[in-house]
Amino acid sequence: MHVGASLKLLRMDAGLSLRDLARRIGVSSAYLSRVEHGIDPPPTAERLAAIARELDLPPALLVDAASRVSPFLNHYLETVPGASALFLEIARRRLNGHQLLRVHELIAQEFPLPEPARRAPPPGLAPLLSEERVVPRLRCAELGDALDLAAARLAPALETSATQLAVELHAAEQRASSHVGAGVAVARLHRASGPAVAALLTLSPPLAMGGGAALRVVVVLVSERSPSALALLAHVSRLAAHGLADAIATLDDPAWIVGRITELEMLR
């Protein structure tokens, strides 16, 4: 996955210039630009953690989106060799999401974290969706068609005009492409007030995006501008990196799609 596209969207939504973020993490703006455009490989886990701190995000969100292993986990595996054997047993048994959740619950019950170490999970996508705002297997000629339909589905929840929502979504897309890679686009719209809501559309056939990329899933997020909105964008990028498009693109029932996303988010 081209994680640089997600980093660019996160940086822009945080109100940071390329030069400013580069200076804060101690790299050149030319290097950061190459990463954002997919020319250079994703940064190291340590550098991703530094970027996350500047964006006020949990480092694990960016590290996971780039399919890197966190420095904390690497250090733990080096100092506690038996942990690697345990992870190997989990992998050999190919535990699925529900089974891993049972293991997670057992660990949480038997070995609770001290209070200061506990952290609220990042916001999830599934709770922001409703079946009315999920459109499976949409046929469209261009991304703008999907944005128009998403605006129509979102407008009742926001008590606003679908036409105005569509105009704002198109304007945001003109400022920066919402394509985060792995067949997923995440369009965002920040409003002064109102509830956080989301719409999701799967595209069949996929929409060609240039450079050989194919768009299969469009997520539209509407919320106030806040740290939690930034965390939600990073979280959806992480879902994309971990196979969101493959998991839902062929489903033809909105309830199944919401349920599948709920499963993917169980261990966030």
Image: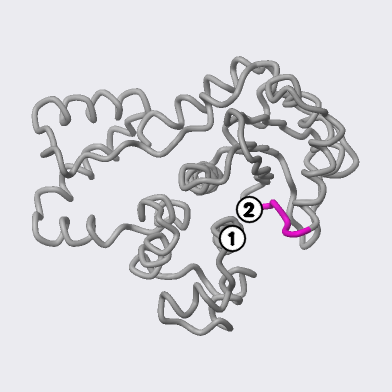
Tell me, yes or no, whether the highlighted magenta stretch contains residue 176. Answer: yes
Task: Give residue 181's mark.
Answer: 2
How many circles with numbers are drawn on the protein?
2
Q: Which residues are magenta?
A: 175-180
Residue drawn at point x = 23 percent, y = 55 percent: 73
Instruction: Classify residue 265 as left or right of residue 192.
Output: left
Which quarter of the figure is the C terminus placed in?
A: top left
Task: Give residue 99's mark.
Answer: none
Residue behind mark 1: 2
Could you say which is closer to the camera, residue 29 or residue 240? 29
Q: Earlier in the sequence, mark 2 or mark 1?
A: 1
| Secondary structure of residue under mark 1 | loop
Instruction: Classify residue 171 as left or right of residue 92.
Output: right
Percent across and percent down for residue 2 are 59, 60
Residue 192 seen in the current view: yes
Residue drawn at point x = 32 percent, y = 30 percent: 95
Percent across and percent down for residue 39 are 61, 74
